Image: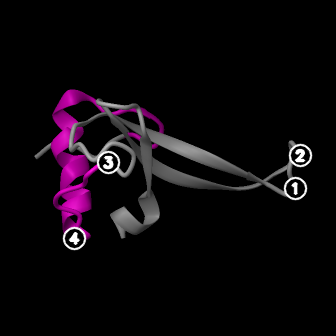
Amino acid sequence: MAKAPEPHGPIEPGQTDHFRGLLQRRGVNDLACPACGQNTWGGFVNAAINITDAPGSNRGVGTIRTLAAVCAQCGYVAMFDREVLDG
Protein backbone atom coordinates (compact mmCIF):
# COMPACT_ATOMS: atom_id res chain seq x y z
CA MET A 1 0.00 0.00 0.00
CA ALA A 2 1.32 3.46 -0.93
CA LYS A 3 2.14 5.88 1.85
CA ALA A 4 -0.15 8.82 2.46
CA PRO A 5 0.68 11.94 0.40
CA GLU A 6 2.68 14.74 2.00
CA PRO A 7 0.69 17.76 3.27
CA HIS A 8 1.76 20.02 0.35
CA GLY A 9 3.08 19.49 -3.15
CA PRO A 10 2.60 17.11 -6.05
CA ILE A 11 1.39 13.59 -5.46
CA GLU A 12 3.85 11.00 -6.77
CA PRO A 13 2.52 8.71 -9.54
CA GLY A 14 2.31 5.75 -7.13
CA GLN A 15 0.12 7.76 -4.76
CA THR A 16 -2.65 8.41 -7.29
CA ASP A 17 -4.40 5.24 -6.14
CA HIS A 18 -4.33 6.55 -2.56
CA PHE A 19 -6.04 9.78 -3.73
CA ARG A 20 -8.70 7.86 -5.67
CA GLY A 21 -9.23 5.57 -2.67
CA LEU A 22 -9.89 8.57 -0.40
CA LEU A 23 -12.58 9.78 -2.81
CA GLN A 24 -14.13 6.32 -3.27
CA ARG A 25 -14.46 5.86 0.50
CA ARG A 26 -16.61 9.01 0.42
CA GLY A 27 -18.77 7.72 -2.43
CA VAL A 28 -17.05 9.56 -5.30
CA ASN A 29 -16.55 6.80 -7.89
CA ASP A 30 -17.02 8.46 -11.27
CA LEU A 31 -16.15 12.14 -11.23
CA ALA A 32 -17.05 13.94 -14.45
CA CYS A 33 -15.51 17.39 -14.84
CA PRO A 34 -18.23 20.01 -14.25
CA ALA A 35 -16.74 22.22 -16.98
CA CYS A 36 -16.27 19.80 -19.90
CA GLY A 37 -17.95 16.57 -18.77
CA GLN A 38 -14.85 14.41 -19.30
CA ASN A 39 -13.40 12.01 -16.72
CA THR A 40 -9.74 12.65 -17.50
CA TRP A 41 -8.30 13.71 -14.16
CA GLY A 42 -4.55 13.99 -13.65
CA GLY A 43 -2.07 16.27 -12.02
CA PHE A 44 -3.18 15.53 -8.45
CA VAL A 45 -1.67 17.96 -5.94
CA ASN A 46 -1.77 18.46 -2.19
CA ALA A 47 -2.55 22.14 -1.69
CA ALA A 48 -3.53 24.59 1.02
CA ILE A 49 -5.95 27.50 0.96
CA ASN A 50 -4.88 30.27 3.32
CA ILE A 51 -7.76 32.08 5.03
CA THR A 52 -7.32 35.77 5.84
CA ASP A 53 -9.29 38.03 8.16
CA ALA A 54 -10.49 40.30 5.31
CA PRO A 55 -10.21 40.59 1.52
CA GLY A 56 -6.76 41.92 0.60
CA SER A 57 -5.39 41.26 4.08
CA ASN A 58 -2.11 39.46 4.66
CA ARG A 59 -3.08 38.41 8.19
CA GLY A 60 -3.82 34.70 8.12
CA VAL A 61 -6.44 33.18 10.39
CA GLY A 62 -6.35 29.57 9.17
CA THR A 63 -5.60 27.08 6.45
CA ILE A 64 -7.73 24.50 4.65
CA ARG A 65 -5.68 21.50 3.52
CA THR A 66 -6.94 20.23 0.17
CA LEU A 67 -6.35 17.66 -2.53
CA ALA A 68 -6.62 19.24 -5.95
CA ALA A 69 -7.29 17.38 -9.20
CA VAL A 70 -6.74 18.99 -12.59
CA CYS A 71 -8.86 17.99 -15.59
CA ALA A 72 -6.46 16.93 -18.35
CA GLN A 73 -9.03 17.97 -20.99
CA CYS A 74 -9.85 21.58 -20.01
CA GLY A 75 -7.72 22.45 -16.97
CA TYR A 76 -10.58 22.79 -14.48
CA VAL A 77 -9.35 22.38 -10.89
CA ALA A 78 -11.46 20.47 -8.35
CA MET A 79 -10.49 20.75 -4.68
CA PHE A 80 -11.42 18.38 -1.87
CA ASP A 81 -11.02 19.10 1.86
CA ARG A 82 -8.35 16.78 3.31
CA GLU A 83 -9.90 16.76 6.80
CA VAL A 84 -13.11 15.34 5.36
CA LEU A 85 -11.31 12.82 3.15
CA ASP A 86 -8.86 11.71 5.84
CA GLY A 87 -11.58 11.57 8.53
* Location of residue 80 (image quadrant): bottom left
Dot 4: within a 10 Å radius of its alpha carbon, few (fewer than 14), some, or many (20 or more) residues? few
Query: Mark 4 near mark 3, Cβ–Cβ under 8 Å?
Result: no
The amino acid on which the numbered mark 1 sits, given as a three-letter code, is Ala
Per the rendered image, the range of residues in magenta is: 6-32
Q: At numbered mark 1, what does the secondary structure look like: helix, strand or loop?
A: loop
* Lateral position of residue 26 relative to residue 74, left or right: left
First of labels 4, 2 by sequence position: 4
User: Which residue is tagged 2?
Assistant: 57
Q: How far apart are marks 2 and 1 (CA)?
A: 5 Å
Contact (CB < 8 A) between labels 2 and 1?
yes
Asked if marks 1 and 4 touch (Cβ < 8 Å), the reply is no
Q: Where residue 58 sits in the image (x, y, percent)?
A: 86, 42
Up the image or down, 78 lies above or below 14; here it is: below
- Could you tell me which quadrant the C terminus lies in? bottom left
For mark 3, what is the residue?
A: 33
Coordinates of residue 17 in the picture (x, y in percent): 16, 44
Dot 3 or dot 1, earlier in sequence: 3
* 12 sits to left or right of 63: left
Residues marked 4 and 2 touching at CB (< 8 Å): no
At x 17% / y 57%, what residue is drawn? Answer: 30
Residue 19 x %, y %: 25, 48
- Label 1, on which residue? 54
